Amino acid sequence: QVDLPSSRGTHRILNVHKNVPGVLSNIHRIVSEHNANVLGQVLATDAGKTRILNVVPSLDTPVCDLQTRRFNQEAANLGDGVVIVTISMDLPPAQARWCAAAGVGNLTMTSDYYDRSFAKAYGLLIEELGLLARTVIIIDPDETVRYVQLVPEVAEEPNYEAVLVAAREVIGE
């Protein structure tokens, strides 16, 4: 059973699939080819998994590009019990194009462009820039935030080793 809030002037697409890397990226690519936008997505398939939220300002910047490519590589090493979600202010079609060009298929991409609800809820909105602060958040399978790394300078990469150590602790390795 799916119970989603109503939304006027929109169409809903429900895609039930085996959680295989790249499926959502392909959906975003197809939608963008038809000049449509994905306003939101429900990540219910992540229930019971550890989530690493890779929060970046924009994929079209060198540091965000490096960071997201790195987490794409690490995703394969962390196992099926971990899902890495990249959240940026890029529009979904731009995210899909970036993923295709970068060969990124191990991450779930989510846009906070439309209403900045994630940025506001987590206190990560850089008001003067209208962008997300560079952050990595680890949420355990019980929905408890277990780790937060707020990178002090938006032009710097996160400490990947600290994130990976924390992730392995959460997943019990």
Image (cartoon, grey):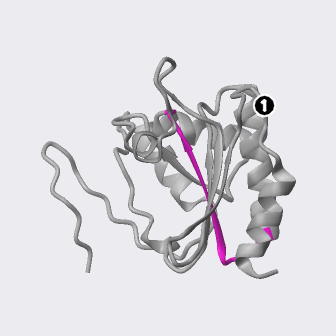
As for residue 57 lying within the magenta part, the answer is no
Residue 8 pos. (x, y %): 12, 46
Residue at x 53% of width, y 70% of height: 144
Furthest-top residue in view? Answer: 128
Q: How many marks?
A: 1
- Tell me: residue 153, above or below residue 43: above
Residue 50, percent from left and from top: 62, 72
Quadrant where the C terminus is found in the figure? bottom right
Relative to 156, is 21 on the left or the right? left
Q: Relative to 93, does residue 27 appear above or below in the rendering? A: below
Residue for badge 1: 156
Quarter of the image that includes the N terminus: bottom left
Decide if residue 134 is on the left or right side of residue 114: right
Secondary structure, mark 1, is loop
- Which class describes the residues within 10 Å of circle 1: few (<14), some (14-19), or many (20+)? few
Residue displayed at 52% across by 72% down: 46
Q: Position of residue 99 (x, y in %)?
A: 64, 43
Q: Is residue 118 above or below residue 127?
A: below
* Quadrant position of residue 161: bottom right
Is 21 in front, or is 76? 76
Relative to 82, residue 160 above or below:
above
Residue nearest the observer in this picture, 134 or 88? 134
Amino acid type shown at disc 1? Glu
User: Magenta region: which residues?
Assistant: 78-90
> Looking at the image, which residue sits at the far right?
161
Please give left or right for residue 92 compared with residue 101 in the image: left
Q: Residue at x 17, y 50 (%)?
A: 7
Picture quadrant where residue 156 is located? top right
Report x, y in % for residue 36: 35, 38
